[in-house]
Amino acid sequence: MNFKGILLTFLLSIPLSSAENSMLGYWLTSESIVHVKKCEEKLCATIEHIFVDEGIDPETIKDENNRDKSLRNRSLIGINLLDDFIYENSTELNNGRIYDPNRGRFFKSNLYLLETGELKVEGCLLRLCQHVLWQELEVSIDSDGNRAATLKKIII
């Protein structure tokens, strides 16, 4: 099964959730699908799926780079990437933290909902910042209960 097949298979199994001009919803990253939602008064972003080679169970991908040795054996599926972001229905949230599983640590972070519909996720160390763009996924259910998913906006 190729990348698109894996993506569509996964997306057909997730619940419907999307809000216009909101950071809430499902997002396609370069390595995973992340569900951004409100968790009490804060924003959280849990990894729902990791893209891996065919034949590898995504649940077996561990948080092996975590600085906390006691967490290195947990699956990356289900972990929360965001910390300290107070939830506001805004296009910009600052002064939170984001966990980078590749480096096994948190970085200061800012989130920006761009006019293109992408989520700019910025991580900073000291005053040096880098960002990645997440693309929003739209999930719909037809009258028969069948689910379909597409990128909300295709950026070329």
Image (tube, rainbow, N blue to C red):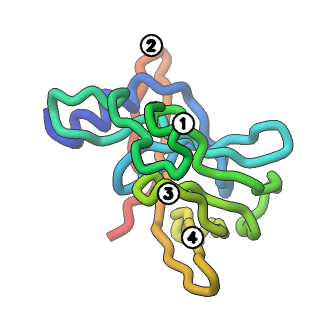
Whether tag 4 and tag 3 are in contact, CB under 8 A, the answer is yes
> Which element type, helix, strand or loop, lies under badge 2?
loop
Name, please, the residue furthest toward the bottom.
127
Discs 3, 1 touching: Cβ within 8 Å = no
Answer above or below: position of 38 versus 92.
Answer: above
Q: Nearer the viewer, mark 3 or mark 1?
A: 1
Up/down of 41 relative to 114, above or below: above
Report which residue position mark 2 lands on.
144
Q: Amino acid at mark 3?
A: Asp
The numbered disc on residue 70 is 1
Residue on which the image places disc 3: 100
Q: Amino acid at mark 4?
A: Gly
Cα gap from disc 3 to disc 1, whole angstroms: 17 Å
User: Label 3 crowding class (10 Å Cα cut-off): few <14, some 14-19, many 20+?
Assistant: some
Q: Residue at x 41, y 19 (%)?
A: 146
- Looking at the rendered image, the quarter that the C terminus falls into is bottom left
Label 4 residue SS = strand
Residue at far front of view? 69
What residue sits 82% from the left and 55% below the top?
86
Residue that carries the numbered disc 4 in the rendered image: 123
Lower position in the chain sequence, tag 3 or tag 1:
1
Tell me the crowding category of disc 4: few under 14, some 14 to 19, or many 20 or more residues within 10 angstroms, Cα based: many
